């Protein structure tokens, strides 16, 4: 959850396309309605009153008396947007030290600024000449780039982005991973000690099968009968669900048939030479006979592991089943 909180970015401003955005021009079409305003009796207010009457009547509730008051209302989340002259807003955005202001949308209309002089003023020609010189030399463009471009002051860019992720945010995940690795290694070491040193001694003392009450896997590891029954169940219930398994099974059956045919051919050759093959012992038994045999042995000789294999024939039978 801590990592998700650092990775998720939240949109903290509304991406307006301009004054003709439906969220501004038709304020009641958006639920909940947005809070935006401007300065009454300004050029922006007169333009909105002329072309967007519904918008002008709605934003009267949120108008501010000064530009700084409107900017402060946006910073304090009192307003969702403040509409005013684009050049002034760009300048205020650049001057914001915390980089919390952003101008969005395209300009609706562009008009020029004018300076008024008294009639027949002696400074009018000098001002016009100096203004033309600034335009020809590129000083106006240089001043505009210096004062009106960029976002925030130099050295304040870090306030716009989230802090970079550090090791402290990933520490809980690494601790959990290390704990899981140590626990798995400990269990593996204990299992190795059990099978190498403890199992043989425990099999001699646990004649009543008490360990099977604690752990089924431990009980099977201590008795040979449980392993035999498990092998029988696997052989009985095994079904190939893979084409590769079917192919291997077909190859094994084919090799078994060829081996049986070869055995019969050798028997015929021995008989043709006058040699009679010895009688075969019944070595292969079915799973049902093995289970019945083991049950009878378990009833007759309870708790004796050595008496279960009392003859070489029985050992051969058990090995064949496995």
Image: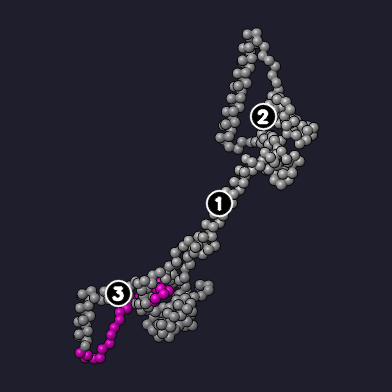
Q: Dot 2, how many residues are within 10 Å of its Cα: few (below 14), some (14-19), or many (20+)?
A: few
- The residue tagged 2 is 319
Span of residues in magenta = 96-122
- The residue tagged 3 is 146
Q: Dot 3, how many residues are within 10 Å of its Cα: few (below 14), some (14-19), or many (20+)?
A: few
- In the image, residue 66 lies at what x, y percent? 41, 85
Can you say whether 142 is above or below 242 in the image? below
Q: In what quadrant of the picture does the C terminus appear? A: top right
First reached walking from the N terminus: tag 2 or tag 3? 3
User: Element type at marker 3?
Assistant: helix
- In the image, residue 314 lies at what x, y percent? 72, 27
Can you say whether 47 is above or below 317 in the image? below
Residue at horizontal 80 percent and vertical 32 percent from the top? 300
Residue at horizontal 52 percent and vertical 57 percent from the top? 174
Q: Is residue 121 magenta?
A: yes
First reached walking from the N terminus: tag 1 or tag 3? 3
In screen coordinates, is 270 left or right of 152?
right
Spatial CA distance of label 1 from label 2 is 39 Å
Q: Which one is nearer the viewer's eye here, 187 or 26?
A: 187
Spatial CA distance of label 2 from label 3 is 93 Å
First reached walking from the N terminus: tag 1 or tag 2? 1
In screen coordinates, is 50 left or right of 233?
left
- The residue tagged 1 is 181
Identify the main secondary structure in magenta: loop
In the image, which is nearer the foreground, mark 2 or mark 3? 2
- In the image, residue 8 lies at what x, y percent? 49, 64
- The part of the image, by quadrant, that contains residue 1 is bottom right
Q: Which one is nearer the viewer's eye here, 190 or 317?
A: 190
In screen coordinates, is 26 left or right of 247?
left
User: Element type at marker 1?
Assistant: helix
Spatial CA distance of label 1 from label 3 is 58 Å
In the image, which is nearer the foreground, mark 1 or mark 3? 1
């Amino acid at each position: 959850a801590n990592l998700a909180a650092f990775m998720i970015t939240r949109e903290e401003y509304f991406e307006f396309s301009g004054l003709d955005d439906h969220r501004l021009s038709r304020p009641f079409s958006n639920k909940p309605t947005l809070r935006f305003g401007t300065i009454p009796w300004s050029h922006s207010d007169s333009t909105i009153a002329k072309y967007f009457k519904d918008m002008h009547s709605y934003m009267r509730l949120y108008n501010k008396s000064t530009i700084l008051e409107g900017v402060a209302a946006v910073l304090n989340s009192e307003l969702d947007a403040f509409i005013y002259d684009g050049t002034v807003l760009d300048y205020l955005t650049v001057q914001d030290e915390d980089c919390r202001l952003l101008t969005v949308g395209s300009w609706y209309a562009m008009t020029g600024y004018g300076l008024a002089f008294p009639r027949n003023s002696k400074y009018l020609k000098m001002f016009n000449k100096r203004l033309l010189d600034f335009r020809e030399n590129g000083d106006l463009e240089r001043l505009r780039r210096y004062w009106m471009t960029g976002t925030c002051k130099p050295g304040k860019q870090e306030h716009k982005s989230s802090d970079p992720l550090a090791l402290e945010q990933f520490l809980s995940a690494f601790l959990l991973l290390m704990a899981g690795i140590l626990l798995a290694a400990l269990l593996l070491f204990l299992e190795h000690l059990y099978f190498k040193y403890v199992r043989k001694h425990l099999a001699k003392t646990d004649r009543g099968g008490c360990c099977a009450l604690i752990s089924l896997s431990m009980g099977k590891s201590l008795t040979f009968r449980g392993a035999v029954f498990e092998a029988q169940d696997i052989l009985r219930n095994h079904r190939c669900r893979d084409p590769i398994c079917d192919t291997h099974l077909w190859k094994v059956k084919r090799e078994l048939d060829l081996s049986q045919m070869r055995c019969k051919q050798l028997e015929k050759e021995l008989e043709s030479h006058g040699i009679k093959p010895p009688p075969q012992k019944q070595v292969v038994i079915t799973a049902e006979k093995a289970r019945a045999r083991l049950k009878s042995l378990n009833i007759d000789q309870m708790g004796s592991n050595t008496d279960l294999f009392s003859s070489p024939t029985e050992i051969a039978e058990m090995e064949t089943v496995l």
